[in-house]
Amino acid sequence: MRLAFYHPEIPHNTGALLRVAACLNVQLDLISPLGFLMSDRHLRRASMDYEKSTFYSIHANFKAFMQCCTDVRIVALIAHGGTVYTSFPFLASDVLLLGPESTGLPEDILEPIPHRVTIPMQQGIRSLNAAIAGSIVLAEALRQRKMLPQTTQL
C-alpha cells in the first residue's frame, strides 16, 4: 500500500505524511511540482527525523508517477462525493492519492480514476487537512488488509 500526494503546497502537511508513512511502514510518493523545497524547515520540523526512516519518491510530474503505477489501483481521496472510506474494499496494493491542499485533485487527474473515497463530515464544514485525511483513510485501508504494524508495549 502506498500514499501519494499530488502537488503538495504546504510543507507541514508533507512533513506530517512523511512521519505517518514511516510509522505505518508505507511508501510516500510526492508528485511535482512541490510548493516548497525538501530542505524547508517547516517540513523538517513536522517530519522530525522520520524522513530518514521513510521510503519516499519524488516524481517529476503526474505522467512519471503513473508510469510506476501500471499494475496498481489508484484510489482518489476527495472532499465530496465518492464512497465513504469505511465502506470501500481496499486492496493491499492500492495507492491512495491526495490532491493539493487549496484545490483538491483537478478534474483532469480525477477523470480516469474510477475509485474515489471520502470522509463524511459535519454539514457546512469544507474539508479536513490533507495530512489528517490521508492518515485516516490510510489507517482504515491498512486495518482492512490486516497490514497495520504490530504495536509495541510500553
Image (cartoon, rainbow, N blue to C red):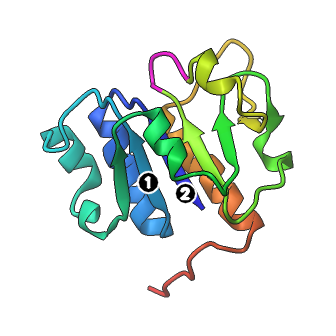
Position of residue 125 in the picture relative to residue 46 (left or right):
right
Residue 34 percent location from the top left of the image: 30, 31
Q: Marks 1 and 2: in contact by CB < 8 Å?
A: yes
The residue under the point 56% across, 24% down is: 105
User: Looking at the image, can residue 123 be seen?
Assistant: yes
Residue 109 in the image, given as x and y percentages of width and height: 59, 25
Around disc 1, counting alpha carbons within 10 Å, would you say few (fewer than 14), some (14 to 19), or many (20 or more)?
A: many
Location of residue 94 in the rendering, given as x and y in whole percent from the top left corner:
67, 55
Part of the protein shown in magenta? 100-104
Q: Is residue 11 left or right of residue 75?
A: left
Give the structural element (helix, strand or loop) at label 1: strand
Q: Position of residue 48 (x, y in %)?
A: 23, 57
Instruction: Assign the C terminus to one quadrant of the image.
Output: bottom left
Asked if residue 42 lies in the magenta stretch, the reply is: no
Mark 2, residue position: 2
User: Furthest-bottom residue in view?
Assistant: 153
Going by the picture, which residue comes out furthest to the top? 124
- In this view, 145 is above or below 109: below
Counting labels gives: 2
x 22%, y 31%: residue? 36
- Towards the viewer: 51 or 154: 51
Q: Quadrant of residue 7?
A: top left
Tell me the amino acid under the disc marked 1. Answer: Leu
Specify whether residue 133 is in view. no
Name the residue tied to disc 1.
28
* Front in this rendered view, residue 55 or 70: 70
Tag 2: amino acid: Arg
Residue that appears at 34% across and 26% down:
9
Quadrant assignment for the N terminus: bottom right
Q: Name the residue rendered at 28%, 26% in the picture.
A: 35
Dominant SS type (magenta): loop
